[in-house]
Image (cartoon, rainbow, N blue to C red):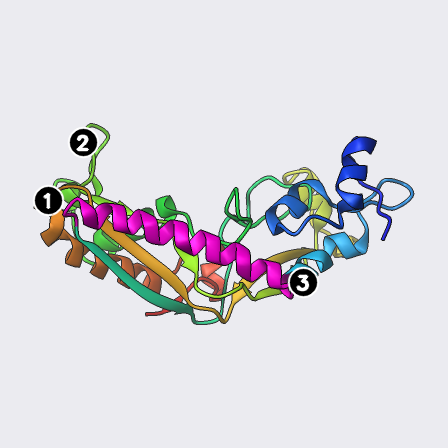
Amino acid sequence: MERNLPLPSDTVKVADGGNRCQNIGLWLDKYLTLNEKWELTQDTKQRKKVFELEQQQKLREILNFLKQRHKALLHWYRQRGFEVRQFEAKPAWRFVVGLGAAHVLETSITLHRIFGLPIIPASGLKGAARAYAQLIEGKSENDQEFIAIFGTTKQTGKIVFLDALPTQPPKFTLDIMNPHFPDYYRTKGKEAPSDWQSPKPVFFLTVSEINYLFAIAARTNDANDLLLTAEKWLKGALRELGIGAKTSANYGYWDV
C-alpha cells in the first residue's frame, strides 16, 4: 500500500512506504500517513495502523524480548542479595499514561522507546505511591520510613520502582474527547465559548483488559524490610488514586 509520508524518499523506499514498520511507537512517531494536501488522514487520526499491528504475531515476539529484559534485570538484583517484590494487576476499565504529551496527533500515549509497547513508567509509579503515602497514610516528608523509601533531593531512596509491563500483547481501545468550544480552548479564553462553534472530536488511545506486571526492588541490603511497605503503598495508589490521565472519569484504576 502506497502512503504519503513526511520523510526523505530514500527512507520511504527502504521502509517500503511504512509497510515494514511493526513497532507501534515508531509508527506513531514517523509513519503517520498524509493525504494529497499533506494533511493527516482519518485513518491516521483513528490510529487504524495500531489496530493492524495489534493483531500481528510480531507483537508477541517483541513483548517476549521486553519480558526477558525485565526478568534479567530482576535477576541482577537478586544475585546481589537485594530482595524483589512482584505482583500483577488488571485495569478495572481503561487507562492511558502520557495523554497530554506533545504529539502531532494532539494526544499521546507512553510507549517503550525501543519496543514500542505501552508501559507505565517507574517515575509515575513512584510518584503515585508517594502521593498515597501522604494523602491516605498521612505520612509527612519528615517521616523516616517515607524518606528511606522515596529519598529526598539530597538522598537517594532505598527502593527502586521498575516500569510496569504488559504480560500479554496489548489490547488497545480508541476513545474520544469532543470539546464543544474549540475556539475558546485554542485561544486560551480570548474567544468566548459560544453555541455556534462546532465540536471537533479528538481521538486518543487507551489500554484495557490485560494484566500488567509491577515490580520493586531493594537498592541496599538494609532496605529489604521496606519492600512490604512500598508494595502496600503502590497497590493502594493503583486501587484508590489511579494512575495516568482522566482518573476523574474512572480511567486508570486497577484491580489489585
Q: CA distance from mark 3 to mark 2?
A: 44 Å
What residue is rendered at 27% in x and 57% in y? 234
Q: Main secondary structure of the magenta part?
A: helix
Q: Which mark is residue 51?
A: 3
Tag 2: amino acid: Gln
Quarter of the image for the C terminus: give it.
bottom left
Is 93 placed above or below 69 here? below
Dot 2 or dot 1: first in sequence order is 2
Q: Which mark is residue 221?
A: 1
Q: Which residues are magenta?
A: 54-82
The percent coordinates of residue 224 (x first, y second) are: 12, 51
Residue under numbered circle 2? 155
Q: Would residue 29 be found to the left or right of residue 7 on screen?
A: left
Tag 1: amino acid: Asn
- For mark 2, give the secondary structure: loop
What residue is rendered at 18% in x and 31% in y? 155
Tag 3: amino acid: Phe
Q: Residue furthest top?
A: 154
What residue is rendered at 34% in x and 66% in y? 88
**Disc 1 packing (10 Å; few <14; some 14–19; many ≥20):** few
* Labels 2 and 1 touching (C-beta < 8 A): no
